[in-house]
Amino acid sequence: MTLQSPNKAKATPSEVTAVLRRILAENGDEYRWTYVVAIICLLLVSGTTAFTAWIMAPIVDEIFYERRGDAIVWICAGFMAAYVVRGFAGYGQAVALARIGNNLVARYQKRIFDHLMKLGVDFFNDTRSGRLAAQVNENVGGIRDLLSLTLTSISRDAVTLIALLGVMIYQDPVLSLSSLLIGPPLIWAVVYLTRRVRRITRESVLINSRLTGAIQEATQGIAIVKAFTMEDALAAHIGAMADTAEQRNNKIARVSERLSPISDMLAGLAVTAVIAYSGYRAIVLGQPPGSVLSFITALILAYDPARKLARTQIGMERALVNARMIYELLDREPKQSDAPGAAEAHFTTGAVRFDNVSFRYVEEVPVLQDLSFTAAAGKMTAIVGASGAGKTTLVALLQRFYDVESGTIDIDGQDISKVTKHSLRSSIAYVSQSPYLFEGTIRDNIRYGRLSATDAEIEQAAHQAAADDFIRQQPQGYDTPVGESGATLSGGQRQRVSIARAIVRNAPILLLDEATSALDNEAEARVQEALTQIMAGRTTIVIAHRLSTVVNADHIIVMEQGRLVEEGTHASLMADPHSVYARFHRVQGKKGLGLVDDAKPIQTPLPRSRGKKVVGRTV
């Protein structure tokens, strides 16, 4: 994910206000009445705090100085009532704010996921999934904290501080003005520390997300880790990242906590001066102690909301960094979107035509060049070629994971760039060479092909994919959980489940990208027989390294370096012993392999490139 540099993460007051306004505009109406309840509770807490300071004067003067017994009842009753109100109000505001915060987190998690699903494949190719998930989890709380801190600082701490200042001024205006002299140095300290925290917090978020992502990737690839004895190397790498994260977190703690000794010393200085001056007036001038004690109580109580307000500014800077990073993701526009006025696709026969299609992932490296061919409706078209020829890119373009650079792709005469991506992909069933299963049961994973499929249709699709037998041998049959990424199943079993998922989709176009590569010979024969049945009447495009799987194809496309170099049937291509296709067969006959990466490059000049060598991206 593209993020701003930590050094560019400076937020002006207007930007803080803009982020708050955006959050409130997006969520304020939803929580209006809950906020009203929380604010009322917070105001009650503030009022009872100020009342506690004010009542100290009659306690001392009426009870202890003038020894009035009748005052004990109403003073004690008032004191007790204040704490009862404070207790219930504190409970109410805590529950209300917790409900708002938890709902905000859930709401933004759903919103972020919905937005991620709209982003193109290019975004996920450039972003490590583990790091992205960790960063989202760490940042999403920033929205909640920003609102919560703003509400509590304004409704509770600021109101409490103002109320206590009112008590102080009421009791002694001169002392009140003198005690406020600690304000300027405290404000200067807050401004200085917030600048430091802002930069360090962003660095910490990025480092922690990389650490969490690395741990997640290591656990997901544990089989490779152990097979290549990478435990010590990864432990050292992750250990170093953990040490860096610890250092950044410690630095945040050191910087943000510097406010505590500064504020404590300033508050101590103010309270000491007030006590000294008040003691002088009581001893020398003989003034009653009640008002002075009430003033000192208000001053001491005012320290806590003042300190919280100062710390709130630092906390808001940290929350603002997280909120801004969330909005950077939400504001990221998909590079590939539906064309204005895009229509719903309505494919009938499913004939696919590539017309002079060119494409490149990066500017300097062409992957497909002037590619033209037709996959006839209801027929099987096979795409063969060595690794890097552009076969998988071709399939990705057909599903509009990317848009072509030039040329057109149409299905039944409809340009796929002018129809909605959802309707296009709903008409295609896809089986990749790397089967992926999601959390849930085997039945759930097959049903992802078509959510409306019945249990009977799911079991029929599994039977056609030669998966029914092994599924029924599982502890819970079709309701057996597959584990993370299908870890409880073998590679061949995962592939057969993914084939069943494509079968149950019942789409007019079927894309098979090395669909049987993970199967043994017996299972492959069974699946090929099943695929032959389900391919009947469907336009099928098959990518295969093992040419035995495409011998019976109606049409074979041979690709090299992003260009079509030969096409025809198996018989017509084999008729020329010097053809690229015939050479592929000889390589397989000698090695017993598919079109392997270590096979010697075919040096036959490319007819459409006039023998010019073209560098392609390996896919």
Image: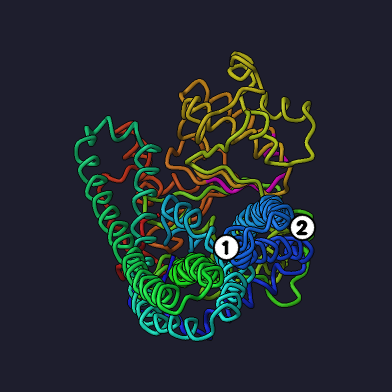
Q: Quadrant of residue 498?
A: top right
- Which image quadrant: the N terminus? bottom left
- CA gap between label 1 and label 2 equals 95 Å
* Residue 19 as seen in the image, left or right of residue 450: left
Decide: is 20 above or below 460. below
Tell me the crowding category of disc 1: few under 14, some 14 to 19, or many 20 or more residues within 10 angstroms, Cα based: few
Residue behind mark 1: 65
User: What range is drawn magenta here?
Assistant: 534-542
Does residue 573 appear left or right of residue 88 in this picture? left
Q: Residue at x 41, y 51 (%)?
A: 385
* Residue 554 appears in the rendering: yes
**Does residue 173 lie above or below 603 as drawn?**
below
Is residue 558 shown left or right of residue 381?
Answer: left
Residue 165 x %, y %: 56, 77
Residue type indicated by callout 1? Tyr
Q: Look at mark 2 in the image and give the residue it sits on.
A: 347
Give the numbered dot on residue 236: none
